[in-house]
Amino acid sequence: MSDRIRASDLPPGTVRPAGPWAVVNTGDRLSAVSRRCRHQLADLAEGTVDADGCLVCPWHQARYDTSTGEMVSGPRGFLGWHGPTPGYTTLVRWFGQVAQLRVRRAVRRGQDVVVDP
């Protein structure tokens, strides 16, 4: 697996896979975070970028700050349930703050975006 992707495949407001990383283009910054959500291990490279520049998990919408790897808001569901889970969400958010995503710098090099080691 390569830790690089074509820059043309990563327009502003998107996230794409690059090896073990979810590479995010918030529009003003490139970054890379580990791909597994701290909630139920969804692939964050299949997520979205919200208006605040957070990476949003595709399964239950947990939100991550891509500059720190911290979960800034917990999931909105569990397994097949999509909806409020106040106590559970608080617990998962606490875990997401303790076990933050790994963060790497992503930079444009020519026609590619590369994840720094």
Image (cartoon, grey):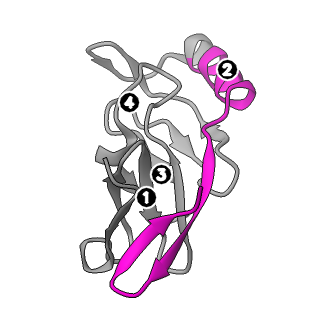
* Residue 65 appears in the rendering: no
Q: Earlier in the sequence, mark 4 or mark 3?
A: 3
Q: Earlier in the sequence, mark 2 or mark 4?
A: 4
Task: Please name the residue that numbered disc 2 is placed on.
Answer: 95
**84 shown above or below 6:** above
Task: Please name the residue that numbered disc 3 is placed on.
Answer: 55
Q: Earlier in the sequence, mark 3 or mark 2?
A: 3
Give, as a single range, the part of the protein colored magenta. 89-117
Task: Give the residue type at disc 4.
Answer: His
Dividing the picture into quadrants, the one containing residue 8 is bottom left
Q: CA distance from mark 2 to mark 4?
A: 15 Å
Q: CA distance from mark 4 to mark 3?
A: 12 Å
Q: Residue at x 65, y 14 (%)?
A: 91
Q: Any mark on residue 23, and which?
A: 1
Residue 23 part of the magenta segment: no
Tell which tag, 2 or 4, sits nearer the viewer. 2
Q: Is disc 4 in contact with disc 1, using a CB cutoff of under 8 Å?
A: no
Q: CA distance from mark 3 to mark 1?
A: 10 Å
Q: CA distance from mark 4 to mark 1?
A: 19 Å
Q: CA distance from mark 3 to mark 2?
A: 17 Å
- How crowded pointer 2 is (Cα within 10 Å; few <14, some 14-19, many 20+) is rated as some
Q: Any mark on residue 60, and which?
A: 4
Q: Earlier in the sequence, mark 1 or mark 2?
A: 1
- How crowded pointer 3 is (Cα within 10 Å; few <14, some 14-19, many 20+) is rated as many
Say which of 75 and 42 sits in front.
42
**84 shown above or below 27:** above
The C terminus appears in which quarter of the rendering? Answer: bottom right
Q: Is disc 3 in contact with disc 1, using a CB cutoff of under 8 Å?
A: no
